[in-house]
Image: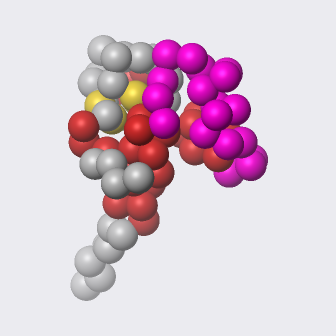
Amino acid sequence: MQVKWKDHIVSTMDVLHGKPRIKGTRIPVSLILGYLANGSTFDEIIEEFPDITKEQIAACLDYARELSEFEVATA
């Protein structure tokens, strides 16, 4: 499933102090990534959070993938 995280993830200072979250919810990306890291399936996560979709969960993974590609310039 090819998903662009920018379509599903937002960060605004007025909600969750700017933590990245699933658009239209107060569910932080870090919470969904934690569920995935602990072995939860997409369906199990949706059972726990019925307001989100498989595409939004995939967007959380895409967001994490992009962050992992970040390179710090060294002097």
Q: Residue 40 location, x and y as percent?
A: 71, 42
User: Between 5 and 55, which is closer to the camera in this rendering?
Assistant: 55
Placement of 14 over or under 57, stated as above or below: above
Task: Tell me what residue is drawn at x 59 percent, y 34 percent.
Answer: 31
Q: Residue 4 location, x and y as percent?
A: 28, 48
User: Between 26 and 53, which is closer to the camera in this rendering?
Assistant: 53
Placement of 42 over or under 49, stated as above or below: below
Whether residue 15 is visible to the viewer of this picture, yes or no, is: yes
Residue 39 in the magenta stretch? The answer is yes
Placement of 64 over or under 68, stated as above or below: above
Q: Residue 47 location, x and y as percent?
A: 66, 22
Whether residue 29 is visible to the viewer of this picture, yes or no, is: no
Residue 46 in the magenta stretch? The answer is yes
Judge from the rendering whether residue 45 lies leftward or rightward of residue 75; answer left or right: right
Judge from the rendering whether residue 28 lies leftward or rightward of residue 48; answer left or right: left
Q: Residue 67 location, x and y as percent?
A: 38, 59
Task: Tell me what residue is drawn at x 74 percent, y 49 percent.
Answer: 39
What residue occupies the far right of the structure in this picture? 38
**How did the renderer colour the structure?**
secondary structure
Quarter of image, res 59: top left
Q: Quadrant of the C terminus?
A: bottom left
Task: Tell me what residue is drawn at x 29 percent, y 82 percent.
Answer: 74
Task: Tell me what residue is drawn at x 58 percent, y 44 percent.
Answer: 33
In magenta, the rendered stretch is 37-54
Placement of 12 over or under 29, stated as above or below: above
